[in-house]
Image: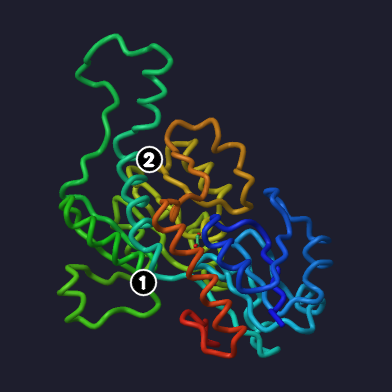
Amino acid sequence: MKPKVLLTHPLLPEAMDYLASEVELELATREMILPRSELLERIGDKQGLLCFLTDTIDREVMDRAPELKVIANCAVGVNNIDLKEAWNRGLLVTNTPEVLTEATADLTLALILATTRRLVAADRFCREGRFRGWQIDLFLGQELSGRTLGIIGFGRIGRAVARRALAFNLKVIYHDPQPLQPALEKELQVEYRELEELLRQADIVSIHASLRPQSYHLISRDRLELMKRTAVLINVARGPIVEEKALAEALASGRLWAAGLDVYENEPEITPELMGLDNVVLLPHIGSATYETRKKMCFMAVKNLLQGLRGEPPDNLIEPF
Ligand code: GLV
């Protein structure tokens, strides 16, 4: 008998067809939002769950699914899943690391360039018919060469950003709970800094940490105060790492020069004050959104799920920490 699997939202079609050929598949919804009641109702008799970062998988969901064995998240971040609860029950939890590293690092550089060179405001200016000719001081921005990039969270994505940054002649400093060995720092041409020191020194601060209780509001109102007035903040990791209201105020008052955001504290809601500001670039959580990467993520999540259901160790099992 094929195992029963709940897929909360569609995968890309090739991966969804493959999954449907291997398991008894129920797709919870084709809508953007899966009502909680639907999730709770449909999970009941399933052995496998393939879900996304928009689905909250907590104790209540697990309580409703006595036969559940595997939770395969189609994302690298797993803050939407109560890991401790899952591990206490012996459930396997998997994610989709590595395949999205390069795409996410690319988007980070896109945001760094878009904010420092004011691309979105300049585009809007043209579309509004306001471009009347070359001017010496039109849309002056900040040059990257020689400036300092501070990377918070120096895992795979942080390092991929650092590699790109060196090509722009940026000096790279980083902060991470686990600093690298000096030899590796030398090889990667990066230097460790304490968080506060990094915030004071960096011209661009880019966040690549995972969301855990320790990183909630890591960039708080007080820490935003430490940044240079000319600094730029980039967040492609998770919204709640930044105190979004305080960030909006800092941008509005000119306390901070600009920000580039792909994630929000209460996604998909965006703090209304940010919407009217020209010095912030707002993206709809598209860090990994390339055809290549999203296809790999889908197949990876399916493979992890099938491995777990067959009793094999999934390639991307998240071990208890
Ligand atoms: C995207 O944010 C992911 O965690 O994959």
Per the model, the C-alpha gap separating discs 1 and 2 is 27 Å
The spot of residue 29 in percent (x, y) is 72, 54
Q: Are marks 1 and 2 in contact (CB under 8 Å)?
A: no
User: Relative to the observer, which residue lies in front, 88 or 251?
Assistant: 88
Q: Is residue 278 left or right of residue 102?
A: right
Image position of 115 with respect to 109: above or below: above
Q: Residue at x 29, y 9 (%)?
A: 132
Which one is nearer the viewer's eye here, 200 or 113? 113
Task: Name the residue type under label 2.
Answer: Trp
Question: Quarter-wise, where is residue 123 in the image?
Answer: top left
Q: Secondary structure at mark 1?
A: loop
Element under disc 2:
loop
State the residue at coordinates (54%, 83%).
307
Q: Which mark is residue 281?
A: none
Q: Residue at x 61, y 73 (%)?
A: 22
In depth, the one of 268 and 252 nearer the eye is 268
Ranked by sequence position, the earlier of labels 1 and 2 is 1
Seen at 49% across and 32% down, the residue is 277
Q: Position of residue 46 (x, y in %)?
A: 75, 76
Confirm or reject: label 2 Cβ below 8 Å from ligand 1.
no
At label 1, counting other C-alpha atoms closer than 10 Å, the crowd grade (few under 14, some 14-19, many 20 or more) is: some
Quarter occupied by residue 214:
bottom right
| Residue pointed to by mark 1 | 155
Quarter of the image with the N terminus in it:
bottom right
Residue highlighted by disc 2? 257
